[in-house]
């Protein structure tokens, strides 16, 4: 089995509320239209935030253990051919190892210390 690896999902407040209240979510509108839930690795996260969430407030960062997502998680090429984790099922609160707010300071989202 592969070594443990955390992957990350950024949610807007309404998306987080849906996941938290219903226990599962198909993700953001882009996830629903693409047919999978987009995740990022720790290395990919800063670019994901700047490209898709620039200036957004109230964001929540979720951490999930990649191995726990099983065969529903596929690593597929995206930006510049880099492999990104995509979840081909609804995201469940049971999948979330931890979550935290992503404050916006000076126009940049502040990541938890362990991800910087």
Image (spheres, rainbow, N blue to C red):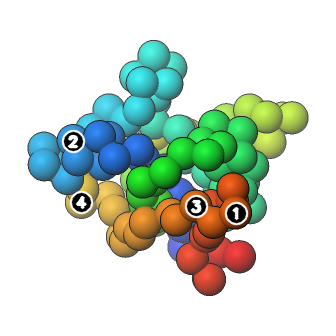
Going by the image, does 83 lie left or right of 80?
left
Residue 103 seen = yes
Q: Which mark is residue 94?
A: 4
Q: Does residue 65 sit above or below 107 in this rendering?
A: below
Q: What residue is disc 1 on? A: 106
Residue depth check, mark 2 versus mark 4: number of the one nearer the observer = 2
Q: Does residue 79 sit above or below 102 in this rendering?
A: above
Q: Tell me how far mark 2 sits from mark 4, CA to CA.
A: 14 Å
Name the N-terminal-most of marks 2 and 4. 2
Q: What residue is disc 3 on? A: 104
Q: Tell me how far mark 4 sits from mark 1, CA to CA.
A: 34 Å
Disc 1, SS:
loop
Q: Tell me how far mark 3 sits from mark 1, CA to CA.
A: 7 Å
Task: Report the residue that reaches farthest toward the right.
Answer: 80
Name the N-terminal-most of marks 4 and 1. 4
Name the N-terminal-most of marks 3 and 4. 4
Residue depth check, mark 4 versus mark 1: number of the one nearer the observer = 1
Q: Which mark is residue 18?
A: 2
């Amino acid at each position: 089995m592969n070594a443990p690896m955390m992957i990350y999902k950024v949610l807007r407040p309404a998306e987080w509320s849906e996941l938290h209240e219903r226990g599962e979510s198909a993700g953001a509108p882009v996830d629903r239209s693409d047919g999978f839930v987009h995740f990022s690795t720790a290395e990919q996260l800063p670019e994901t935030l700047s490209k898709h969430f620039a200036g957004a407030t109230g964001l929540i960062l979720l951490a999930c253990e990649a191995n726990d997502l099983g065969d529903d998680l596929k690593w597929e090429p995206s930006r510049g051919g880099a492999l990104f984790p995509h979840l081909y099922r609804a995201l469940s609160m049971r999948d979330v190892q931890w979550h935290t707010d992503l404050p916006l300071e000076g126009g940049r989202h502040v990541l938890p210390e362990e991800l910087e």
